[in-house]
Image: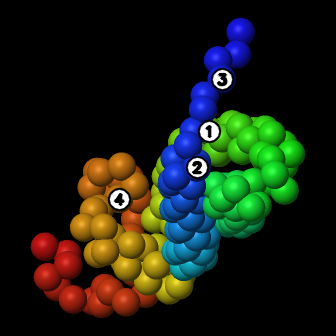
Amino acid sequence: MVFPITFSESGRNKLGIISALMCAILVLAGLCLIFVGIYIQININDELILLESYNDGLLPNFLMCLGVLMIIINAVTAKFAYDSGFAETSEKYRMAMLPMSVVMFIFIWVILSASITAFAHRASVEDALHNGITDAMKRYKTTVVVKEALDRLQMFSRCCGSRSYKDWFKTGWINLKYVNKSDPKLSA
């Protein structure tokens, strides 16, 4: 059963403007998603040496594509919603509102699946980071690039090791090439 809702001309006008403003806010949210994807891509590339077996482009590219889709779909919907709020242009966009509503409904499910994917992706990033840091700790004393990346990460995060400071007890991190072995203090 369908219940008809009647709007006055000013009510339809306000509804069209409010709908267009809501779509404009979603366009800004899409723009934010693009910036978040770029930020993640840049930060992951800086610390890529510490991530093991991680597909670095999956999450950022997914977020950027989703942001572009949000901008396109919501910009078009904002135009339709705004123009359907006025009597002169409402007939022109009336037929397009049903397909646009279906597209918006599908897009809501895409955003929901993206949220679930991002949440599920968190565990793979944590595992890759743990494995990568553990491997980097093994290469700490021999590779300068790894040493600098690991030092930078741990100073920035104010942490030590992969899971705790005890991780350093399991690996040798002092390069004996730089230790004076003839120093009598070392033998004591």
Name the residue beneath numbered marker 4: 161
Marks 2/1: CA–CA distance: 35 Å
Kind of residue at badge 3? Pro
Is there a contact, CB below 8 Å, between mark 4 and mark 1? Answer: no
At which x and y percent is residue 12? Answer: 58, 48
Name the residue beneath numbered marker 3: 4
At horizontal 54% and vertical 59% (from top left) the residue drawn is 17
Mark 3 closeness class: few <14, some 14–19, many ≥20 residues within 10 Å: few
Name the residue beneath numbered marker 1: 112
Secondary element under disc 3, as helix, strand or loop, is loop
Q: Name the image quarter holding residue 51.
A: bottom right
> Which mark lies nearer to you, 4 or 3?
3
Q: Nearer the viewer, residue 110 or 1?
A: 1
Is residue 183 placed above or below 89 in the rendered structure? below
At which x and y percent is residue 1? Answer: 71, 9
Q: Nearer the viewer, residue 185 or 108?
A: 108
Q: Name the image quarter holding residue 61.
A: bottom right
Q: Nearer the viewer, residue 41 or 174?
A: 41
